[in-house]
Image (cartoon, grey):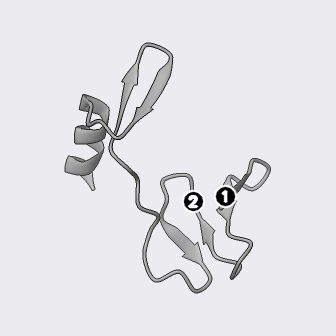
């Protein structure tokens, strides 16, 4: 999905699905929210594939 800043939504070009900034499906055919891969923040870098404290907190609050 591509982010649309003016609408604060991610829009999928394939089937018109829309997701809010947390990845929750808000419109269209997607049956579930976007999956967020494990990540960690290392200074100013976003590292995918590794679980950092921010990711663990997000998962615990979901």
* Closest to the observer, 48 or 19: 48
* Mark number, residue 20: 2
Q: Nearer the viewer, residue 59 or 38?
A: 38
Residue at image point 27% right, 56% down: 62
Numbered tag placed on residue 9 in the rendering: 1
Label 1 to label 2: alpha-carbon separation: 5 Å
Q: Quadrant of residue 41?
A: top left
In percent of width and height, residue 21 lies at 56, 52
The vertical placement of 12 against 51, above or below, is below
Choose top left, top right, bottom left or bottom right for residue 12.
bottom right
In the image, residue 12 above or below residue 53: below
Secondary structure beneath disc 1?
strand
Are the residues at dot 1 and dot 2 in contact (C-beta closer than 8 Å)? yes
Check the image and name the residue furthest to the bottom. Answer: 29
Q: Which mark is residue 17?
A: none
User: At which x and y percent is residue 28?
Assistant: 62, 83
Q: Is residue 55 left or right of residue 17?
A: left
- The residue positioned 68% from the left and 52% from the top of the image is 8
Residue at horizontal 46%, vertical 83%? 31
Crowding at dot 2, Cα within 10 Å, few <14 / some 14-19 / many 20+, comes out as some
């Amino acid at each position: 999905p591509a982010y649309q800043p003016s609408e604060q939504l991610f829009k999928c070009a394939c089937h018109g699905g829309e997701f809010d900034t947390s990845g929750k499906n808000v419109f269209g055919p997607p049956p579930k929210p976007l999956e967020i891969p494990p990540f960690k923040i290392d200074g100013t870098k976003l590292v995918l594939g590794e679980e950092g404290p921010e990711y663990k907190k997000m998962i615990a609050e979901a």
